[in-house]
Image (cartoon, rainbow, N blue to C red):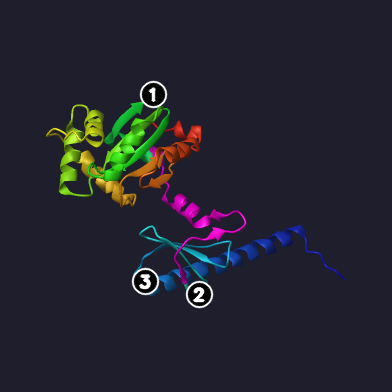
Amino acid sequence: MTVFAQPAVARSIAFLLGLTTMGFAQASEEAVKKGMESFIGAPAVESVAETPYGGLYEVVLKNGQLVYTDAKAEFVIDGSIIDMKTRRDVTQARLNELSAIDFASLPLERAVKQVKGKGTRVIATFEDPNCGYCKRLAKDLAGMDDITIYTFLYPILSEDSANKSNNIWCAKDRAQAWTGWVLDGKEPAAADCDVTAVAQNVQLGQQLRISGTPTIFLADGTRIGGYMPAAELEKALAEVKPKTASKSK
């Protein structure tokens, strides 16, 4: 004779099974974390999560690096995982998620602001005045329309970078001083003012794990690490949802 569980009993069993599965998952993730940190020799793991593919575990390190391992943490995979059906780089997609920010939280008052045309499209950049690719980006941005650019001065290359950043920040017209330098090579005039904002930008960049310039953030929080040609940047901007972008000041 077949015996059917009552609905309430069935729900209880399902709930308990769910808790048991969750407990195993948490235990496995903790074991993976311990195994990885033992291998590395330092408490370097930020998070561990089981993936839906290949029985692998995603391991995010505190330096932002993403690697994979098995349930026993016996092997480490350092590289991209490609979904062969969709040809999607799932590793890069995950890295994009992990590196995204809350754009609305950026202290835009500490950035050099430029508005071109209506300025409805918004980006923020972290740039060093002595960065060659930043100058290349500036030339591309000069040819773009309908965009607001917030440039956070981020002097990380040299002492001269700090001097130039401070002089640009203290200029009467910051946007003119910035573009004059990156576009035309016009040395920013010596100036004196409170440059706390520049120092705070460096601290912010470190918190955001910005190790190179330029680093670009779109209004939806997407991070673009490094120089991106104008055509590709235009395409990326076109994919930003208008509602998200409109929240930017």
Of the image marks 1 and 3, the number of the one nearer the N terminus: 3
The amino acid at mark 1 is: Gly
The amino acid at mark 2 is: Lys
Which residue is denoted by mark 3 in the rendering?
A: 40
Of the image marks 1 and 2, the number of the one nearer the N terminus: 2
From the image, which quarter does the N terminus lie in? Answer: bottom right
User: Which residue, as the protein is rendered here, is positioned at the far top?
Assistant: 118
Tell me the crowding category of disc 3: few under 14, some 14 to 19, or many 20 or more residues within 10 angstroms, Cα based.
few
Which residue is denoted by mark 2 in the rendering?
A: 72
Q: Which residues are magenta?
A: 76-104
- Under tag 3, what secondary structure? helix
Q: CA–CA distance between discs 3 and 2? A: 15 Å
Using the image as rendered, state which of residue 94 and residue 195 is in the foreground: 94
Residue at image position (73%, 58%) is 8
- The image position of residue 230, as x and y in percent, is 40, 38
From the image, which quarter does the C terminus lie in? Answer: top left
Let me know if residue 107 appears in the view. Answer: no
Q: Nearer the viewer, mark 1 or mark 3?
A: 1
Which mark is on residue 117?
1
Using the image as rendered, state which of residue 31 and residue 217 is in the foreground: 217
Residue at image position (25%, 46%) is 202
- The image position of residue 190, as x and y in percent, is 11, 34
